[in-house]
Image (cartoon, grey):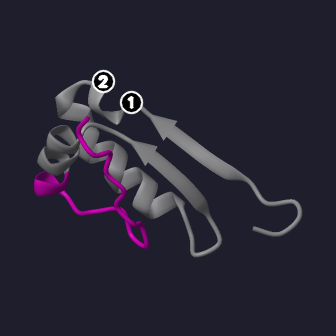
């Protein structure tokens, strides 16, 4: 990231009401461009369920936390 860039952090997607998660992902996909930087934090299962209803975040990489 260069100067004057912003990194967005959206935490707790999984705590959003289940019926709103897919719409949130669709809105993010429409709103963000190739210059946007976003970290989305969510429990894996809840994210997978939302993705089944819409699509993954465009240009996003998945990072998972290993169990202890």
Residue at the spot 38% in from the left edge and 30% down from the top edge: 12
Residue identifier under label 2: 15
Extreme residue toward the right, this view:
3
Residue at the spot 44% in from the left edge and 62% down from the top edge: 30
**Does the segment drawn in magenta span residue 58?**
yes
Camera-nearest residue between 26 and 48 = 48
Image quarter for residue 24? top left
Extreme residue toward the front, this view:
68
Camera-nearest residue between 41 and 51 = 41
| Residue 14 vertical position relative to residue 30 in the rendered view, above or below | above
**Does the segment drawn in magenta span residue 10?**
no
Q: Is residue 33 left or right of residue 29?
A: right
Image coordinates of residue 17 in percent, x first then y, are 24, 24
Residue identifier under label 1: 12
Mark 2 Cα shell of 10 Å, populated few (<14), some (14-19), many (≥20): few
Image coordinates of residue 68 in percent, x first then y, are 26, 35
Image quarter for residue 55? bottom left
Q: Main secondary structure of the magenta part?
A: loop
Q: Is residue 26 left or right of residue 6?
A: left
| Residue 12 vertical position relative to residue 1 in the rendered view, above or below | above
Mark 1–mark 2 Cα distance, whole angstroms, equals: 5 Å
Image coordinates of residue 13 in percent, x first then y, are 35, 35
Question: Mark number for residue 55?
Answer: none
| Residue 64 vertical position relative to residue 33 in the rendered view, above or below | above
Image coordinates of residue 48 in percent, x first then y, are 16, 50
Residue at the spot 67% in from the left edge and 52% down from the top edge: 7
Q: Is residue 38 left or right of residue 28?
A: right
Q: Which residues are magenta?
A: 51-68
Mark 1 Cα shell of 10 Å, populated few (<14), some (14-19), many (≥20): few
The reply to whether the C-beta atoms of the residues labelled 1 and 2 are less than 8 Å apart is: yes
Find numbered disc 2 in the image and state the secondary structure of the residue it sits on: helix
| Residue 28 vertical position relative to residue 42 in the rendered view, above or below | below
């Amino acid at each position: 990231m260069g100067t004057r860039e912003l990194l967005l952090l959206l935490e707790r997607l999984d705590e959003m009401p289940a019926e709103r998660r897919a719409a949130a992902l669709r809105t993010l996909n429409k709103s963000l461009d190739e210059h946007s930087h976003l970290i989305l934090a969510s429990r894996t299962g809840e994210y997978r369920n939302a993705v089944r209803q819409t699509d993954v975040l465009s240009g996003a990489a998945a990072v998972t936390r290993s169990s202890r």
